[in-house]
Image (spheres, helix red, strand yellow):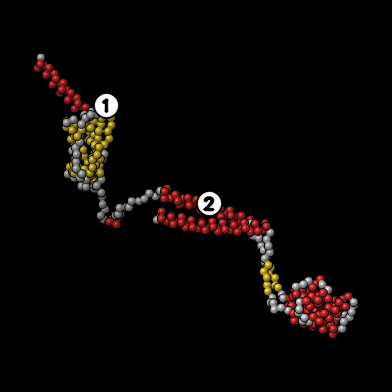
């Protein structure tokens, strides 16, 4: 009975081991069966076993040859998936070769729970690059790594500055239209010549002399013009309102100034003029001529050393005109500022574009 029991136990253990062995599956695949010299191929060794199975993968040193001519560049663990209650674990080997040949990749050995399992043998074809040695001028050096043609972070400033330039152009156009509607205020500056009193008086006397009024029968007109000329001169020269004063008042005022030059002759001239204008007196021709000479003499003796000057008279603007003028100045300033900003920004944008596209 003991012998029979031992046989049953041994058979159970054998079937259990066989069952577990049948549960382990090993797959060995490669992603490309043909590569060019220097290219890389990925070989995957996958094991499907129990969750707690202990797996020992075949290991290779960096640049170690799997077979003569086929080099293991690197190796790393792959994906872990669940398949029908089992766990599928993979290990990836990166291969390369620099010799043109058809290589036989041997089946790799992996240990699962101390038992040895093998993958499947593979083939790897290594091809060379055809080279046209008859046309070496068609060979080109390797291209440089090119930058990304568009990065928003690089173009963002150029974009927003371009928007600002467009807005400034629109603003400048609007201000220009406003400036055209705001018509300029035209002020005409008058140039006034200030002729000295004695020059005006002597000029008037010369006109009286040239008109031969002293010899005419209308003596009243003659003496009226002559005395009016003297009154205007005295008013400007001595600073009192001689046009509204009588002849005696003028003489008394002149005597008060302390300047006695020609006063007596001037007094006689005013008396003769009053007689002619108000008493219908007829003066002699010689007397008329003498009075004309005395008038010119009085003016010449009492003149001041002043010269003819010109004065610029700028008319004052009204409140509305002043407001319009200020608005035009403000609009012009804004337009000039906008134009300068546009020029500066356009120059900067062109520079940035040359940097980005260059």
Identify the image quadrant of residue 260. bottom right
* Residue 295 image offset from top left, x and y in percent: 79, 80
Position of residue 135 relative to residue 113, above or below, is: below
Q: Residue 227 carries which label?
A: none
Q: Where is residue 146 in the image (x, y as percent from the top left)?
A: 35, 51
For label 1, the SS is loop
Instruction: Determine the residue positioned at 85% across, 83% down.
Output: 287
Give the CA separation, mark 2 to mark 1: 69 Å
Q: Name the residue under label 2.
A: 167
**Crowd rating for badge 1 (residues with CA inside 10 Å; few <14, some 14–19, many 20+):** few
- Tell me where residue 271 sits by quadrant: bottom right
List the residue tagged with mark 1. 85
Compared with 295, 311 (above or below) is: above
Residue 268 coordinates in the image, percent (x, y):
83, 81
Which residue is found at the position 58% from the left and 58% from the top? 332
For the point 84% across and 85% down, which residue is it? 286
State which tag comes first along the sequence, 2 or 1: 1
Outermost residue, right direction? 280
**Which residue is at a point 20% across and 47% down the rendered structure image?**
99
Callout 2 secondary element = helix
The answer to whether one can see residue 40 in this image is yes
Who is closer to the viewer here, 214 or 12? 214
Residue 224 in the image, given as x and y percentages of width and height: 83, 76
Is residue 183 in sight in this rendering? no
The quadrant of the rendering that contains the C terminus is: bottom left
Give the answer, above or below, for where 314 lies relative to 258. Answer: above
In this rendering, would 203 be left or right of 287?
Answer: left
Viewed as shown, does residue 71 lie left or right of 193?
A: left
């Amino acid at each position: 009975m003991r012998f029979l029991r031992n046989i049953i136990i041994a058979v159970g253990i054998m079937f259990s081991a066989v069952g577990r062995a049948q549960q382990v599956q090993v797959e060995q695949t490669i992603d490309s069966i043909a590569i060019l010299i220097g290219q890389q191929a990925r070989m995957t060794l996958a094991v499907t076993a129990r969750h707690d199975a202990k797996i020992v993968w075949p290991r290779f040193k960096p640049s170690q040859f799997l077979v003569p001519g086929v080099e293991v560049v690197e190796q790393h663990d792959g994906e872990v998936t669940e398949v029908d209650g089992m766990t599928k674990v993979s290990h990836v080997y990166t291969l390369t070769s620099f010799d043109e040949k058809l290589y036989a990749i041997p089946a790799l050995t992996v240990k699962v729970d101390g038992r040895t399992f093998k993958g499947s043998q593979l083939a790897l074809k290594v091809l060379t690059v055809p080279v046209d040695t008859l046309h070496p001028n068609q060979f080109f050096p390797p291209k440089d790594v090119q930058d990304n043609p568009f990065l928003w972070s690089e173009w963002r400033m150029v974009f927003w500055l371009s928007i600002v330039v467009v807005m400034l152009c629109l603003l400048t156009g609007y201000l220009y239209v406003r400036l055209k509607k705001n018509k300029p205020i035209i002020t005409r500056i008058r140039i006034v010549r200030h002729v000295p009193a004695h020059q005006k008086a002597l000029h008037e006397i010369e006109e009286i002399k040239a008109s031969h009024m002293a010899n005419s029968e209308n003596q009243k007109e003659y003496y009226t013009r002559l005395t009016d000329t003297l009154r205007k001169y005295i008013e400007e020269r001595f600073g009192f309102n001689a046009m509204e004063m009588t002849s005696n008042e003028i003489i008394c005022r002149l005597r008060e100034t302390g300047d006695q030059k020609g006063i007596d002759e001037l007094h006689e001239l005013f008396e003769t003029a009053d007689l002619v204008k108000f008493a219908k007196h007829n003066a002699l021709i010689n007397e008329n001529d003498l009075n004309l000479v005395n008038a010119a003499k009085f003016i010449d003796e009492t003149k001041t050393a002043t010269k003819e000057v010109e004065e610029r008279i700028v008319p004052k603007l009204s409140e509305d005109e002043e407001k319009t003028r200020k608005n035009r100045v403000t609009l012009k300033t804004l337009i000039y500022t906008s134009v300068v900003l546009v020029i500066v920004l356009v120059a900067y944008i062109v520079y940035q574009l040359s940097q980005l596209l260059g």
